[in-house]
Image (cartoon, rainbow, N blue to C red):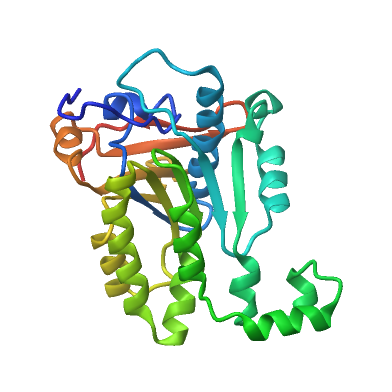
Amino acid sequence: MYTEINRYMPTGLSTLDPVFGGGVPPGSVILLKGEIGSGKIEFAYTSLIYLSLIMARGSSDKKVLIPADIRYITVTKMREDILREIEQSFSPDLLTNIDKVQFDDLSDIYFDSSLVPIGWYSDYEDIIERMEKRRKIHDSVLSTLSDMLSDIPKESMVTIDSLTELATQHIAAGTWPDLTAFLRGLQRVAKKWNTTFYLILTKGILNQWQETEVADAVDAVIHFRWEESSTAKRQRVLYFEKFRGVMIHLEDREMVKFAVRITAGRGFEVSNIRVII
């Protein structure tokens, strides 16, 4: 167990936090990158569910930094859809404090710059009023997101679902440097705020150099993927591509790659394969 970090923020995953000595360094920007269905979303859901339970019961350990706020920010999804998916996926016993998680929805601004009909995503009853509002909106998703993040209490845990939509929007608009500048600014200010961020990215949509540039701008990259086992059975695994200030301790203990199991009763769990890759 490493001791260089005075305080840690738990992920809430009881099978993973001990690997970090109790949790991750506060102020970490962590990229959750993976194939479709590989477990990155379930990782984020499990983390916020258990953090809501930890927030409710508190902790007497002075080294534990319990988030002041838990935020889940969506770019295209509605709060109701996220909650419905969580309720369908996890045991009700785990969701007793899910109301401590605040959900924010940026889909109005995201879809306002698209050809998607207003009635598909907006609750505005007066379409004329909505169209007038649309003409007046000049803020981008990133500028709105930046303002939103600035208002979140320090020492929080924030999930942004997802970086994939933000990236493809900026690629289409030819403003990729704006996104990478935002990520580098976020990585910097996260330390000032002591706020930890999860950024969800679907692998294979960006090209290789774009994925590399995103990975270079964050503190940690957790890669989720499917692998074939010796019995030809598909197995979810995760491994750490990078984790500034932490990676060396993981490699010292031969803990870099992990098997993954997802169940309704316990959510996302890992077990140590003890293979350095």
Q: Is residue 87 above or below residue 61?
A: below
- Residue 230 falls left or right of residue 69: left
Q: Is residue 11 above or below residue 179?
A: above
Whether residue 225 appears in this view of the structure is no
Image quarter for residue 8? top left
Q: Residue at x 71, y 52 (%)?
A: 81
Q: Is residue 96 above or below residue 99?
A: above
Q: Position of residue 200 (x, y in %)?
A: 45, 55
Whether residue 47 appears in this view of the structure is yes
Q: Residue at x 69, y 44 (%)?
A: 83
Q: Quadrant of the N terminus?
A: top left
- Residue 10 falls left or right of residue 36: left
Q: Residue at x 31, y 35 (%)?
A: 24
- Residue 82 falls left or right of residue 12: right
Q: Residue at x 35, y 67 (%)?
A: 182
Q: Position of residue 120 (x, y in %)?
A: 77, 73
